[in-house]
Amino acid sequence: MLDAVVVGAGPNGLTAAVELARRGFSVALFEAKDTVGGGARTEELTLPGFRHDPCSAAHPLAVSSPAFSALPLERHGLEWLHPELPMAHPFPDGTAAVLSRSVAETAASFGPRDAGAYRRLVTPFLPRWDTLVRDFMSLPLTALPRDPVTLARFGLIGLPPSTWLTRRFRDERARTLFAGLVAHVMAPLSGFATSAIGLVFALAAHTRGWPVARGGSQALSDALAGYLRELGGTVRTDYEVKRLDDLPPARAYVFDTSPTALARIAGFGDHYARYRYGPGVFKIDYALDGPVPWTAPEARTAGTVQIGADSAEIGAALRAASRENRAPDAPFLITVQPSVVDPTRAPAGKHVFWVYGHVPHGWTGDLTDAIERQLERFAPGFRDRVLARATAGPPELAARNANYVGGDIATGAVSGLQTLLRPKLSLSPYTTPHPAVFICSQATPPGPGVHGMPGHNAAKAVWRRLRRT
C-alpha cells in the first residue's frame, strides 16, 4: 500500500507530492492530461517554433515562494530569466509608470507628488520580505508566524479595500498601476483584502523580480516532476480519475482539483455547494513578426505590461465581468512578452506575446476585437505584427484544465471572506469529510498563483496524519 496518492499534477499537486516524498513517504501522482503542469505548461499553440504558455507566464510569486526556494529545482533544469523591467503600465499619452526592482525608480515614475507616499508604503516591509512572505503564505494555522509584528502591520494595511490604500496617492499614475496589480486576481477594487494583493505583487517585484522561466513555464513543472522521480515518487499521465476506486490503495489521497470536482469524485455530496467561482478570462496567444510596437519606451523592455487607461477604466472592466455579467467594452489586459528576455521562445527575430482580459463566468463570446482595439491604443500597428493567434475563452480554458471552472483561472472567486477562508470556513482547510482525503489546489489558502504553497501546506496536514497513524 502506498503512503499517499496525489491527483492532479499542477504546481500544487507536484509540490504536495514532492514534500511527502522528501519525508520518506511512498507517493504516486496521477494526471488526466498527457503532460504534467496544470496551469504551468508550455505548448506550440500557433506556429512551429513559437512556444506559448497557455496559462501562467510571469512568476513573481513562484520566485518568492518558500516552498520552491527550499527545493533544488535549478538542478532539474529550472532557470529564471529577469527582464530589464518587471512590469510597465503605459498611458495613452505615451508615458508609463513602472514597477522596477528599484523602489526609487518606481516612485519616480509616479511623479513627485506620490513618490514619497509610495516609498513610505513599501520600504518598511522590504528588509523583512522573506519572513513576511513565509508567514503570509503559511496561513492559516500551518505554522506559527516568525514575525507576528510585521505580519500584523501588513494586515492593518492589507485587509482594507485597495480603494482605501490608493487614497494615499494624489495623482492617477500610482492609482492606476496599483489598481492593475489588484486586478491580477480578478477582484473588484473595493473588495476585502485587495490592498494586500496589490502590495504583495509590488513587494515581490522589488525583492525578487517578476521573472519568466527559460523555455516556458513547463520548465517549472518538469523540474518539480524530475525531483519527485529522483525521490522515488512515480508520475502517471493520461489517467483520469472519476471516483476514488480508480486509484490504488493508499493511506492518504491528496487532490489538486476544484472543490466541486473533489466532491464528485469522493462522493461528498453538497459539502462544497456554497463555494463560489469567479469571473473567467479570454486568453490570446500571439506569434508576432517583431516586438510589440509600444508607444511608451519602458513597455518595450518590461516582461509584463498592464493595459488600462486609468483606475476608473480598470474598475469598470472588473465590475462588468464580475457583477454586471457582461464583457467590458474596454477590457483591462494583463500581457506578458517572454521573448524580450528569452530568445528560445520564438524563431530569430520573432516574438511570442501573451494576453488576457476578464469576462463573465462561463462567457461564450469572442473578445478578440476588443482586446486588439485596446492594444492598438498603446501599441499602434500591433495588428500588422500578428502572424498567428490562438484564442481561448472560458469553455476552452475549462476543457484544457478542469480546475478552471467557467474559465476562472483562480479556481474560485477571490472576493469577500473567500479571499482568505477557502474552500470553507475551517481551521483546517486542507482536510475534508473523509479523514484520508485532502485538498491542495489553489482553492485553498493562500489562494491562486503559481507558488506551490497550498500543496506545501496541505502536505503538512497529510504527513502529520500519516505519522499519527
Image (cartoon, rainbow, N blue to C red):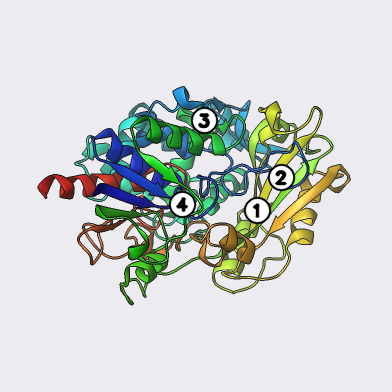
Q: Which residue is mark 4?
A: 31
User: Alpha-carbon distance for marks 3 and 4?
Assistant: 31 Å
For marks 3 and 4, the one nearer the N-term is 4
Q: At 23% from the left edge and 65% from the top edge, which residue is drawn?
A: 434
Q: Amino acid at mark 2?
A: Phe
Q: At 33% from the left edge and 31% from the top edge, which residue is drawn?
A: 231
For marks 1 and 4, the one nearer the N-term is 4
User: Alpha-carbon distance for marks 1 and 3?
Assistant: 21 Å
For marks 3 and 2, the one nearer the N-term is 2
- Above or below, comparing residue 256 to residue 267 in the picture: above
Q: Amino acid at mark 4?
A: Glu
Pointer 2: residues within 10 angstroms few (<14), some, or many (20+)? many
Q: Nearer the viewer, residue 326 or 110?
A: 326
Q: Is 356 displayed left or right of 254 in the figure? A: right
Q: Nearer the viewer, residue 235 or 167?
A: 235
Residue 209 is labelled as 3
Q: Nearer the viewer, mark 3 or mark 4?
A: 4
Q: Which residue is mark 1?
A: 356
Q: Nearer the viewer, mark 1 or mark 2?
A: 1
